[in-house]
Amino acid sequence: MKYLIDASVIIAAAGAGSRARLGYNKILYSAEDKTVVRATAEKFFGFRKIIVACADADLPLMRDIFADMENVTVVIGGETRTQTVRNALRYAEGEITLVHDGARPFVSRELIEKCVTEALVNGSAVPCVSADCAIRSARGSVTEALDRKNIYFVQTPQAFETQALKEAYSSCLGDYADDAEVFEKSGRECHIVEGERTNVKLTYPDQFFNRFGMKIGTGYDVHRLVGGRKLVLGGVQIDYEKGLLGHSDADVLVHAVMDALLSAAGLPDIGVLFPDSDPQYEGISSMELLSRVMKAIHPIQIISLSAVIMAQRPKLSTIIPTIRQSLAAAMGIDKSKVNVSATTTENLGIVGDGEGIAAAAEVLVTL
Ligand code: MG
């Protein structure tokens, strides 16, 4: 197999990524049809070997993700980052080995090549950026300002002579924050190179939401008006001689809202999630179903919801503020993000004839 750079890179991808609160390993997050870990690994094109060290549970999926990249070897990592790199190092070949976080997809090719070159000359290359805000140390409730001129944030990829790194790992048992620390603990010196501020490690939910755009969802529903039923719209009971017919409480507005949310999240609609053939949903409050939908779409964040109720009667204008408040509370978002309007259909069609009430909803979310 031909390669351009006689170096291996270990992609450390065995963590849980739990701080991202995605409910699954953050490196498996997909943006524009590419997972974070794949986007990260692709930055190392031309390398002799790309060793992706992942958790046992993610192994089949990882093999799938990298099936078409012939220089990728997927291996099982360990309980800790140090253990993961130690396992993966057995597969490293070539003069230089880099270790890179699986959640740093924004690293530039320039930095990668600089690390390889500097490690060839100096034995190692560890990218660092200077602290760009004031730093304090804390001991209990007492804090003390530190001179930030002497503080650096350490990034990856960290590059080392392969043989020296293997020796460092075999002489240092225990767990360390990164490879530079292992290298130093083994009595070797780390050569520092300038890192990049854009080379961030994806860690927290807002980093995923802000970087990877938004989605829109649409929902629509209609229910028949009949005597002897309560009229509930947006979780608010409304005085009227008729109510909506349905398996649940037939809250047509909440049904449209739920379908909009599920659609934005790429999930099946409420007919699939809460089938009307299932007796457990008989007479159930749609607000209860909405709270289940909110759990299902977690951790998606709602930017705004816009809904319209189509009803010839009753007049809804005075009740709309209460409905807005009710929906906002159920979704755990501010009322300013929820808007609801009402319209008649000029006596046309089933709504205009007073046979039913319809509702449509659109929602904008960040993923
Ligand atoms: Mg419905």
Image (cartoon, rainbow, N blue to C red):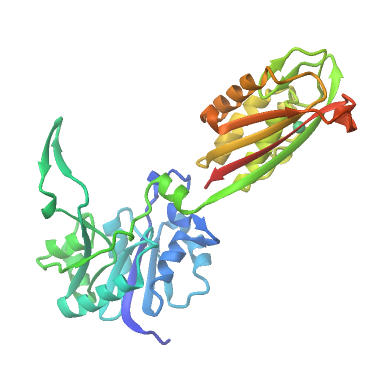
Q: Quadrant of residue 328?
A: top right
Q: Nearer the viewer, residue 229 or 334?
A: 334
State the residue in front, 236 or 335: 335
Q: Compared to 117, does 201 lie above or below?
A: above
Q: Quadrant of residue 229?
A: top right
Q: Is residue 308 left or right of residue 327?
A: right
Q: Is residue 222 above or below residue 99?
A: above
* Quarter occupied by residue 100: bottom left
Quadrant housing the N terminus: bottom left
Vertically, is 349 above or below 94?
above
Ligand 1, image quadrant it occupies: top right
Residue 90 visible? The answer is: no
Residue plotted at (54% across, 49% down)? 214
Q: Is residue 184 left or right of residue 302?
A: left
- Give how far across and how far down residue 281 sits, in percent: 72, 27
Identity of the residue drawn at 29% across and 59% down: 197
Rendered location of residue 221, percent (x, y): 76, 35
Residue occupying the far bottom of the picture: 2
Q: Residue at x 55, y 61 (%)?
A: 33
Left-right relation of 145 to 103: left
- The structure residue drawn at horizontal position 13% and vertical position 63%, both measured from the top left corner, is 184
